[in-house]
Image (spheres, rainbow, N blue to C red):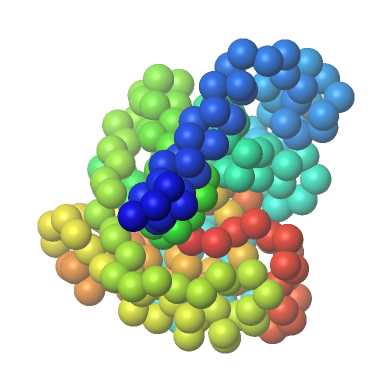
Amino acid sequence: MGSGGPTARTGRLRSVGLLAAALDLLLPQRCAGCGDADGLVCPVCAALLGGPARVCPPRPAPPGLPRPWAVAPYTGAVRQVILAHKERGRTGLARPLGVGLAAAVLAAAGDTGCPVLLVPVPSSRASMRRRGHDPTLRIAWAAAREAAVRWGVAVSVSRALAQRRGVADQAGLTAAERAANLAGALTVRRDVRGATVIVVDDVITTGATLAEAARALRAGGARVPAAAVVAATRRYGDAPASRDLGHVP
Ligand SMILES: [Zn+2]
């Protein structure tokens, strides 16, 4: 295998992700949300992630979608913070995003009355290679820490889901096309029988990804009454989603 083979390419991609994370620590920072203020994320932009959480079902909602809670619309500074964390390796943003996700998780858990088990939607191998990290898992860990430290609520995180097969890029697909693209794509890899699970992601768009995650967890014997995300897109009917949503599982 030459220097341009898949292994070398994978290594370079991972290095790009690590380099971005290292630079994030070393260079003077501008707020990832507004780009104006100093620091990782300024108080004004951080406040946008502070909740309160709301139920944010997409319309139409896919069959089996757990009740989804979010703390912000996926626009403006919130969208910029999520994309900087996910696509530009600013891994320090997991903490403020985790604060937002924790608010959504606690609201979602209020419905269940059970110990809180978070299961993040898994990234595809291709996304992991490209990004150099698993952004949803990182935010889920941060949310669990926030829930424990600030709210005294024990929240555990389980990587109970895995991708069973590759899926096409979701961007630009209608809600129906997304659901077909994802059907059967996920499977459980941990024993979740009898568990009450809140499935988590950074963004809800059509709800197809969260519905497929819930289907797989339920097939494994879990209850999945609710989902928690940081942000929800505004959608209208079955129109194609914007190509720049930046949300690929
Ligand atoms: Zn800002």
In this view of the protein, which residue sits in the foreground, 121 or 193? 121
Q: Quadrant of residue 245?
A: bottom right
Q: Is residue 152 above or below residue 164?
A: above
Q: Residue at x 64, y 70 (%)?
A: 171
Q: Is residue 25 left or right of residue 213?
A: right
Q: In the picture, which quadrant includes the N terminus?
A: bottom left
Q: Is residue 56 left or right of residue 75?
A: left
Farthest residue, direction right: 36
Q: Residue at x 48, y 61 (%)?
A: 249
In this view of the protein, which residue sits in the foreground, 13 or 213? 13
Query: Does residue 182 appear anywhere in the picture?
Result: yes
In this view of the protein, which residue sits in the foreground, 166 or 146? 166
Q: Position of residue 72 (x, y in %)?
A: 68, 47
Q: Is residue 134 above or below residue 248?
A: above
Q: Position of residue 24 (x, y in %)?
A: 61, 22
Query: Does residue 136 appear anywhere in the picture?
Result: no
Q: Residue at x 48, y 35 (%)?
A: 15
Q: Is residue 106 above or below residue 18?
A: below
Q: Position of residue 168 (x, y in %)?
A: 51, 74
Q: Is residue 62 left or right of residue 238?
A: left
Q: Position of residue 202 (x, y in %)?
A: 54, 49
Give the quadrant of ligand 1.
Answer: top right
In this view of the protein, which residue sits in the foreground, 239 or 29? 29
Tell how many labels. 0
Q: Residue at x 75, y 34 (%)?
A: 33
